[in-house]
Structures are given as structure tokens and as C-alpha cells.
């Protein structure tokens, strides 16, 4: 599948000015949700991350932002599906990327809400009236009605398109089939699902049993997953979580919570959390023991998120912006008892939470991540005390970033001993992660 890029065709005065003007659509209308979702989808298809795109909706009402986000996430999860349908319903790519993205959003709604087809088409046409000066209103109406007429034929034809059926890029599917021949289809299915909402109870403030009781008293249900993790039966607004503002609980996938459990630093130890933003694992480490912890992240803006998280939870740590590969810029020369190396990776194990990755990631990116991961390991290892432990962590399901990376590192470092390895493939209860716990010879 080729993701269409924005054209360089000049914008008409009416097209550009109308799109930047305030919308006349009702704040609670599906039309506004579709229009805003189209903006997000078009940005991702042009190469922008969904997080960056979402920041452009800051001036919209909270309900409108949430509804647009829901449509955009759903559309992007169905990588290849909407593109396949548009390829059959359009004779050529539209010269207006946002209108094309509007069609993807509307097709997603038609597939998931077929009983509301009339309303979806009507509201998509209303949204199209605010794009490109309304030049494509008729086309949007015709394409969507044509989809309704040909729905069964189109979906039968889709059965022969691997990308459209599996909703993942072809190169990604090929790698999964090689790496996980018996599990690849389950991994793909999990990546296409809406993620569960999992909590991490702050054990410094409240027990899991007591917090579960508070949830139930507030009318919400959840089940324990072990450790400090609670899986909610259905997602809920963060602000509605009992005691969230007071630091009783955080949002964190159960698989991500394994990092603190595996590294398990003892009270009083000196700990480095490299690549620490946004700070979920940092906070979890500090919830388990009183530590002398340094959190490093290369992105100064993201380090502020670490500080915000720690402030809410009432946890002390030193937070600095810096490249973990350049210790001379931030290291005081005192070795660490434990290091968490949560390295940059393909994020192929968390794609259900970040569906834009299906559009943004390229197969050639894997080689770059592998080089960066190896460099981080080699630069951090000398900072570890003899007898100290380093936990290597990724949210990838590709072996080049996981076991193969550790195989190569242990070969380069004879004083590195493997204590444990854990591969978590995506499923209902957690996303996909890989962990390798290494110890430096005393």
C-alpha cells in the first residue's frame, strides 16, 4: 500500500481560508468529529506522528477532541483497509489530502456503524462542505453511497489483499511470519484491537485490594493482573479515577510494569533510568523502594513530563535532559547499582495504542534502531558497578531488537551474564515487550 502524500498544488483562497476558519459545525456533531479526524489522519499519512497531530486540536471542545480521536484511532488501526476501498471507489487520488482522509474516516464509521449509514453519509457531506471550499461535497456523497451499494463485492475482493485483511504493512507481516510462525496471526489480531486500560496502584499510598474496593464503590469494575496491575473492564476518563490527582494510581500497561519487577533494585541503591520519558517506569521503580535515582531523556520537553508524573505521585528523583550515550555530559563518575535501558525501538509491540506507527515505520528503520540499541548498551555498561544489574527493555516483537541484540552484546561483553529473559507477545492483558536482565561480573 502506498500512503498518499500531500500534493504541492497551490491552495485556492477559498480552500485554505475556509479550513483555517472556525467551524460552523455543532460541537457535538458527528460532522465535526469527522472533520477533525480527517485533519489527524491526513497529518499521519503525510508523516506526522499522531501525538503531534493531536496537539493541533487544543482549541476544540473536550468532547469534540475525544470524538475525533476515537474516529482517527479506529481509522488508523485499519491500515490498508480504507486505502483498499478508496482504490476501488476513486478513479484517481484526490488533490486534497484532507478530503481523502475524510473519506477514510467516514468509511471506518460505515464499516463499524452500518446501522447509522444514512447519518454517517449526511454528516460526512456536511464536513466536506468545510474543506476545499466545499468543492468535493458531491464526490464525498457519491463515493460513500457507492460504497454502500458495492459493500459486499468490495469486501469479498478485499479477501485477496494481505495488507487490507491483516491491517498491517506487508513487510511487517513478513517479519512476523518469520519470527513467530505459530503466533503471528494472534499478534496481528491483538495489534488491531482497541487496547485495554490498565492501572498501576501506588503501593506507597494504598494496597491493590483497597484501591479495587474504591473503584467498585465508585461504580467501576476491574480485575487484578498480579503485582500492582488492575485491568479495567472498560476505559474511563483519567480524571474520574478515584485518587488519581492525589497519586494513588497511574495508567500503565501490565507488560510495562514488569520492568520494575524484574530490575527490583534494593532500597538505597543508585539507579539510572536511561531514555526515561514519559516517566512511567521511573515512577514505578521509586514506588517499590527508596532509591537514589537519576532519570535521563534526550528530549528536554519530555523530561518535563517525567517531573510532572513524579510531582503528582510525590516521588523524589533527579531528572536531566541528555543523551544517555554521552555520559560525559551528565555522569558524575559514580557507578550505578542498577540501570534500566528502555531503548528506542520499532514500538511494534504497542501498535494498538499507537496505530500511526503502521503508517510511519519503514522496514529500513529496524536497522537504525538496532544500531542505536547496541550503542546505548555499550555506552551504559561501563557505568554499572561490578555485580550490578542492567535491564534491557523494548516494546518490540522483532527478534533483531530483542534476543538477537542481547546475543550480540553478551558476545561483545564477556563479563555480562544473563540472569533472565522475558518475551511478552501482545494479548488482551498486555502489550508486547522484551526484557533481558544482565549482571556484570564482580
Image (cartoon, grey):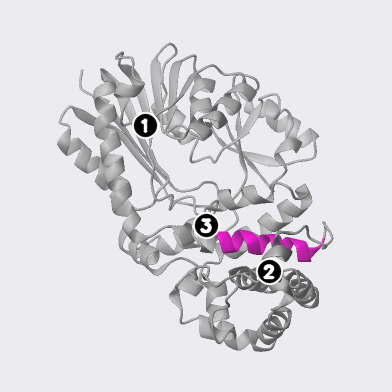
Q: What residue is shown with label 3?
A: 356
Between 383 and 204, which is closer to the camera in this rendering? 383
Left or right relative to 133: residue 268: left
Span of residues in magenta = 29-43
User: Dot 3 lies on which element?
Assistant: loop
Q: CA distance from mark 2 to mark 3?
A: 31 Å
On screen, residue 305 above or below 365: above
Residue drawn at (72%, 35%) of the image: 241
Of helix, strand and loop, which mostly describes the magenta segment?
helix
Q: What residue is shown with label 2?
A: 13
Left or right relative to 375: residue 293: right
Q: How many marks?
A: 3
Q: Which mark is residue 323?
A: 1
Quick one: label 2 or label 1, which is nearer the N terminus?
A: 2
Q: Nearer the viewer, mark 2 or mark 3?
A: 2
Quarter of the N terminus within the rendering: bottom left
Amino acid at each position: 500500500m502506498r500512503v498518499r502524500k500531500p500534493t504541492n498544488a497551490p491552495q485556492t483562497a477559498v480552500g485554505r481560508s475556509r479550513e483555517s476558519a472556525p467551524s460552523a459545525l455543532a460541537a457535538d456533531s458527528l460532522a465535526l468529529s469527522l472533520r477533525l479526524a480527517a485533519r489527524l489522519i491526513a497529518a499521519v499519512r503525510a508523516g506526522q506522528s499522531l501525538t503531534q497531530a493531536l496537539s493541533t486540536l487544543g482549541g476544540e471542545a473536550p468532547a469534540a477532541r475525544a470524538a475525533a480521536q476515537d474516529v482517527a484511532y479506529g481509522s488508523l488501526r485499519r491500515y490498508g483497509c480504507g486505502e483498499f476501498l478508496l482504490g476501488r471507489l476513486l478513479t484517481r487520488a484526490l488533490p486534497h489530502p484532507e478530503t481523502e482522509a475524510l473519506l477514510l474516516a467516514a468509511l471506518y464509521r460505515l464499516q463499524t456503524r452500518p446501522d447509522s449509514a444514512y447519518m454517517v453519509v449526511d454528516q460526512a457531506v456536511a464536513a466536506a462542505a468545510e474543506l476545499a471550499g466545499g468543492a468535493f461535497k458531491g464526490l464525498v456523497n457519491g463515493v460513500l453511497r457507492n460504497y454502500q451499494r458495492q459493500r459486499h463485492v468490495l469486501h469479498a475482493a478485499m479477501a485477496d489483499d494481505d495488507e487490507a485483511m491483516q491491517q498491517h504493512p506487508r513487510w511487517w507481516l513478513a517479519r512476523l511470519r518469520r519470527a513467530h510462525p505459530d503466533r503471528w496471526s494472534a499478534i496481528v489480531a491483538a495489534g488491531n484491537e482497541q487496547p485495554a486500560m490498565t492501572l498501576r496502584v501506588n503501593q506507597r499510598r494504598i494496597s491493590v485490594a483497597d484501591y479495587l474496593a474504591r473503584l467498585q464503590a465508585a461504580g467501576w469494575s476491574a480485575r487484578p493482573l498480579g503485582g500492582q496491575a488492575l485491568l479495567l473492564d472498560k476505559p474511563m476518563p483519567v480524571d474520574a479515577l478515584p485518587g488519581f490527582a492525589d497519586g494513588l494510581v497511574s495508567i500503565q500497561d501490565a507488560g510495562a510494569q514488569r520492568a520494575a519487577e524484574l530490575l527490583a533494585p534494593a532500597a538505597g541503591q543508585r539507579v539510572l533510568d536511561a531514555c526515561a520519558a514519559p516517566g512511567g517506569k521511573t515512577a514505578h521503580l521509586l514506588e517499590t523502594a527508596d532509591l537514589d535515582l537519576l532519570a535521563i531523556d534526550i528530549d528536554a520537553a519530555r523530561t518535563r513530563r517525567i517531573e510532572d508524573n513524579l510531582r503528582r505521585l510525590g516521588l523524589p528523583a533527579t531528572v536531566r535532559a541528555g543523551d544517555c550515550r554521552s555520559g560525559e555530559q551528565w555522569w558524575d563518575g559514580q557507578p550505578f547499582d542498577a540501570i534500566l535501558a528502555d531503548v528506542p525501538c520499532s514500538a511494534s509491540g504497542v501498535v494498538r495504542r499507537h496505530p500511526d506507527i503502521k503508517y510511519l515505520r519503514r522496514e529500513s528503520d529496524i536497522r537504525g534502531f538496532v544500531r542505536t540499541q547496541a550503542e546505548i548498551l555499550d555506552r551504559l555498561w561501563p557505568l554499572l558497578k561490578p555485580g550490578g544489574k542492567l535491564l534491557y527493555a523494548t516494546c518490540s516483537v522483532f527478534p533483531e531488537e530483542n534476543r538477537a541484540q542481547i546475543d550480540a552484546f553478551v558476545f561483545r561483553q564477556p563479563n555480562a551474564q544473563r540472569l533472565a529473559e522475558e518475551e511478552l507477545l501482545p494479548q488482551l492483558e498486555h502489550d508486547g515487550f522484551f526484557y533481558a536482565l544482565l549482571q556484570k561480573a564482580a
